[in-house]
Image: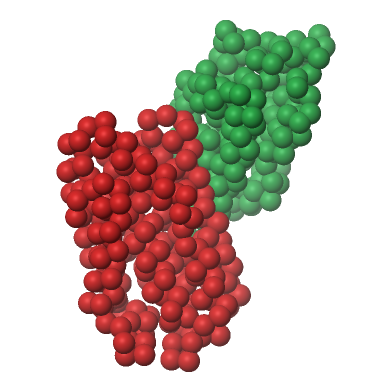
Chain colours: A green, B red
Amino acid sequence: MSAPDLPDHAVVDLLGLVALGELLAFERMAVDARLAPDLRRRAALGEMAAAEIGNYRRLADRLAALGVLPDDAMAPYVGALQAYHDSTEPRDWAEAVTKAYVGDAIADDFIREIATALAEPDRQLVLDVLHDSSYADFAVAEIRAAVEADPRVADRLSMWARRLVGEALSQAGRVATAERGAFTALIAQGGQVDVQGLFRRLTEAHSRRLAEAGLNN
Amino acid sequence: MSAPDLPDHAVVDLLGLVALGELLAFERMAVDARLAPDLRRRAALGEMAAAEIGNYRRLADRLAALGVLPDDAMAPYVGALQAYHDSTEPRDWAEAVTKAYVGDAIADDFIREIATALAEPDRQLVLDVLHDSSYADFAVAEIRAAVEADPRVADRLSMWARRLVGEALSQAGRVATAERGAFTALIAQGGQVDVQGLFRRLTEAHSRRLAEAGLNN
């Protein structure tokens, strides 16, 4: 069921982490949707949120099929993921879409890393929960519009994006050093990957995306 | 496109009302999910919420196909629906699931009334957004469990349900007397229906459902 050098409990840990990420992303986006300036945009962020809970369901079903209660698999990560969201509450619509954009993208990069450590069917399942790029297009358009309306917004959102990635990596570090060891198993896989390498790839991709949205790194 | 005696603008009004109901129900359930005692229940209410935004999308697409901006069709109802939700913020999980149960059911009853006034394809579209009964089963089980754990909860939830239906009917009355006239057109349809009759049917069905969940009317 798992890749040759990834123990079963590590597979459960990784699926649990991705599942909880989806569940909390759903909630926060749904809450943040209330910051939207009109009903159309409010619904758009709501639909981004709803896609996450659909993904959560698939992961929870897979965990159940593996004989694990989804809650048990997610429990070790509640502290870190909740802390990330609590420390990055957007104050307005531009911050909300920037968070959805940055958060989704980092989650996707991270999920791709996780997928390399998994065997089928878990590899494909995890790849299936990657975000629809149409949501990123929506977010980028909203960020560009906000900056166009007031160029000073670019600096504020750039700083906000830096804070988002900083908090995300800080909590990722907390998860990585947690006793469960799933990350260690993932990161040490094949002896080719280290935490620094993983974080470097994540931050490099983040910088490219900021530029795409017209923000500075 | 509309029933013989229902003008087009009334069709748009009714679809707009149902669409906004779905959008706001999505948001509030997603927010209320955070009151859940564990992740499994939190996800369950989240999935109920996500079903609403899927329905919203279908209604918004239909409005767009009718040449109307969904935001314009929903705008007349924002005040009343927002007031309903603002005045009925659940304080704990039992209140949250009771609100989802009572609110969904009243919405369904109301949608069925609306459907009788519409011609195809709008009639079927509106009937399609009726809630999956599995969600009601979940809510009833949660309410019964809360009452079993502490029988005094029954009184509190019964009072809460009365308040929910009272606020819902009060806001429905506000909508019904609004200048747009869609309700008047609906209620006067065929000369057989009056506001009192509509409200009576809604409250009777509500009483039956409360009994089913072990609550008093």
Residue at figure coordinates x 30%, y 83% from the top left: B193
Residue A115: where, in percent of width, then height?
Answer: 75, 27
Residue A208: where, in percent of width, then height?
Answer: 73, 35
Residue B189 sits above or below residue B73 on the image: below
Residue A55 sits above or below residue B106 on the image: above
Residue at figure coordinates x 41%, y 51% from the top left: B136
Q: Quadrant of residue B1?
A: bottom right
In the depicted view, which residue is nearer to us: A36 or A214?
Answer: A36
Q: Quadrant of residue A16?
A: top right
Residue at figure coordinates x 44%, y 36% from the top left: B42
In the depicted view, which residue is nearer to us: B15 or B98?
Answer: B98
Image quadrant where one finds the C terminus of chain B? bottom left
Residue A57 sits above or below residue A117 on the image: below
Residue A28: where, in percent of width, then height?
Answer: 48, 39
Task: Report if residue A102 is visible in the image.
Answer: no
Residue B208: where, in percent of width, then height?
Answer: 28, 59
Residue at figure coordinates x 40%, y 64% from the top left: B108
Task: Report if residue B80 is visible in the image.
Answer: yes
In this rendering, the count of numbered labels is: 0
In the depicted view, which residue is nearer to us: A163 or B122?
Answer: B122
In the depicted view, which residue is nearer to us: A1 or A99?
Answer: A1
